[in-house]
Structure formats: C-alpha cells, structure tokens
C-alpha cells in the first residue's frame, strides 16, 4: 500500500556543548495519507569537507489511510559532494492501535521549500 502527502517540520537545536555532534528536536505535522504528528530527536554531524550524516528516531501518531495508531520511524542519512542516501524505515514491532503489525519505508523529497513523502507499507 502507498500513502503520500506533505509535512511541515520544525527543528529545535538542543545545547550539547560537550558532544561532537549536533542534536535537534523534530516536530512535524503530516497531511495527506498520513494525518498526524511526528516527534523525535536527531543527531547530526557536518565535516569541514562538507559531508554530513544524521540519524533520527521519530514517533508518528495519528491516522494512516483512515486507520488510527502510532509507529516509530528510524532515519539514517548521508550526504557528500558525490553521493546522497536517505533511508527511513518503520521499526519492526513499533505499530500500535489499528497500525499494529505495520512495516515499510518512507521516502522524503524537498522541493521549493515544500517537504513531501511517500510511505510504502504493509501489515
């Protein structure tokens, strides 16, 4: 099954002066096939050479194609001058409510300041 739509995101930097990476709170509002909120934390690092990495854990709570519940998304991204990769996976066993047993992957695209997603999922 496939759900798609857009989301608004706020990233709130957190103060970790002794850590070699940045940490941010993630606050999202989803619309479209996913209707609800995403909250989480991201750890990121950018090198002097321009490469960057991030990992995040995000909790989605709301409705997916009319079914109510929640699940956890795990983000893992890498970007350099010659390559980019982003994997966002539903954590196995994290679904609750009517979303119990969900599995799948989310793709994200940002164009002209608008964030969109496509979630490929199954039960």
Image: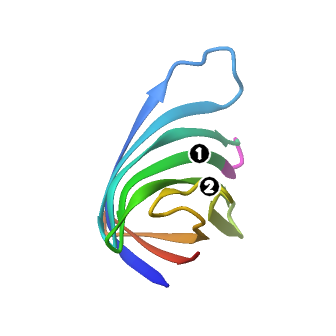
Q: Is residue 95 left or right of residue 62?
A: right
Dot 1, how many residues are within 10 Å of its Cα: few (below 14), some (14-19), or many (20+)?
many
The percent position of residue 61, horizontal first and vertical second, equals 40, 51
The percent position of residue 13, horizontal first and vertical second, equals 46, 29
Q: Which mark is residue 75?
A: 2
Q: Which residue is mark 1?
A: 57
The answer to if 49 sits in the magenta stretch is: yes
Q: Which mark is residue 93?
A: none
Residue nearer the viewer, 88 or 10: 88
The percent position of residue 115, horizontal first and vertical second, equals 36, 65
Q: Does 98 appear above or below 44?
A: below
Q: Which residues are magenta?
A: 48-53
Residue found at the far bottom of this picture = 1
Residue nearer the viewer, 76 or 82: 76
Which quadrant is home to the C terminus? bottom right
| SS at circle 1 | strand
The percent position of residue 59, horizontal first and vertical second, equals 49, 47
């Amino acid at each position: 099954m496939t759900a798609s739509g857009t989301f608004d995101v706020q990233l709130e930097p957190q103060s970790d002066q002794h850590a070699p990476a940045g940490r941010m709170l993630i606050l999202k509002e989803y619309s479209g096939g996913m209707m609800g909120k995403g909250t989480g934390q991201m750890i990121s690092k950018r090198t002097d050479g321009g490469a960057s990495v991030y990992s995040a854990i995000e909790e989605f709570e709301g409705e997916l194609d009319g079914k109510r519940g929640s699940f956890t998304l795990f983000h893992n991204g890498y970007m350099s001058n010659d390559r980019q990769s982003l994997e966002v996976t539903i954590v196995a066993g994290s679904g609750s409510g009517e979303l119990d047993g969900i599995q799948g992957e989310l793709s994200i695209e940002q164009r002209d300041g608008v964030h969109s997603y496509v979630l490929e999922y199954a039960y």
